[in-house]
Image (tube, rainbow, N blue to C red):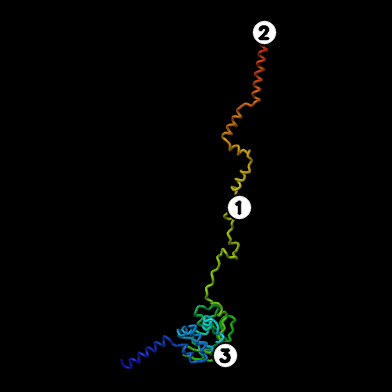
Amino acid sequence: MDSRAISAALLVNFLLFSVASAFNITKLLSQFPDFTNLNDFLTQTKLADEINSRKTITILAVDNGAISTLSGKPLDIVKRILSVHVILDYYDVQKLGKLSNDNTTVLTTLFQASGAATNQQGFIKVTLINEGEVAFGSAVSGAPADSKLVKSVASQPYNISVLQITSPIQVPGIDSKPTNSTPPPPPPASSSPGESPKKAPAPSVETPSKADAPAAETPKAVADAPLSSPPKAEADSPKAAADSEADAAAPGPSDSSSASGGRFVGGAAAVLAVLSWFLAL
């Protein structure tokens, strides 16, 4: 293989490497001693890998003194905060200087791309103040825009731009509990203390009350009935019925005495008639 073929192969490899990785933020910041703490944070949180995977990016860098406010925070919190300082587009000093004094420009950050941002936390606003001074702030309502542009640190148009700002951008709620955490499931509706009385099952619908059930009173009415009542007498038939019929058919004592008296008077009258006939002879 001649020297021209070797040179061509090396050029192709270089171009492929340049396309695959347009920049390396760690190597870039290592050239500036004022940003060693920022460089360490980008490495520890793995943000450097995410930045290097992008083709167009802008880093809002804070020096060692300004970034000291993040010291002692958990790495996941530091990662979210620094993600807001990574703009998903190319901006240099000249491009920012063309912004209108009357309007506020909203820019998308790497934190928005993570899917963990809520309530505009993944966006920052850029505005011009004090006759052309550039200020950055969170797009969350009420957040201050007090991080000001200092200077351009490094740039590689139109792939990467590193801009120094005075202080970290303050994002309300970003250092609290992760916004993408899954909330605990609600308690069952049946055990909820705030359940509406209208939803409670009405016991009277399926279970009739004692007053509404006449069948329930029947045994008590029968039990309270006197023993001499007609239903009791009827319960003793047929023997009781037969005895009642026999008693009704049999003559009473008064009827027997009347019959005997009648026969005695008739006999006496006959005797007197016979005696009267013999005396007449």
Residue 207 placement (x, y as % from top left): 58, 54
Residue marked by disc 1: 209
| Location of residue 6 by image quarter | bottom left
Q: Which residue is nearer to you in this view: 95 or 163?
A: 163
Residue marked by disc 2: 278
65 lies left or right of 13: right
- As measured in the structure, the alpha-carbon distance from the residue carrying label 2 to the one carrying label 1 is 97 Å
Q: Is residue 175 visible?
A: yes
Q: Which residue is nearer to you in this view: 193 or 60?
A: 193
| Location of residue 235 by image quarter | top right
Residue 224 placement (x, y as % from top left): 63, 43
Mark 3, mark 1: which one is toward the viewer?
1
Q: Which mark is residue 133?
A: 3
Q: Which residue is nearer to you in this view: 162 or 91?
A: 162
Q: Amino acid at mark 1?
A: Ser
Q: Of the residues under marks 3 and 1, which one precedes in the sequence?
A: 3
User: What residue is drawn where x is 55% and y is 67%?
Assistant: 187
Residue 268 placement (x, y as % from top left): 67, 15
Q: Amino acid at mark 2?
A: Phe
Q: Is residue 104 visible?
A: no
User: What residue is drawn where x is 36% and y is 90%?
Assistant: 10
| Location of residue 17 by image quarter | bottom left
- As measured in the structure, the alpha-carbon distance from the residue carrying label 3 to the one carrying label 1 is 82 Å
Q: Amino acid at mark 3?
A: Glu
Dot 2 falls on a residue whose secondary structure is helix
Q: Which residue is nearer to you in this view: 69 or 207?
A: 69
Dot 3 falls on a residue whose secondary structure is strand
- Residue 216 vs 87, above or below: the answer is above
Q: Which mark is residue 102?
A: none
Residue 193 placement (x, y as % from top left): 60, 65
- As measured in the structure, the alpha-carbon distance from the residue carrying label 3 to the one carrying label 2 is 179 Å
Q: Residues within 10 Å of mark 3 (few under 14, many from 20)?
A: some
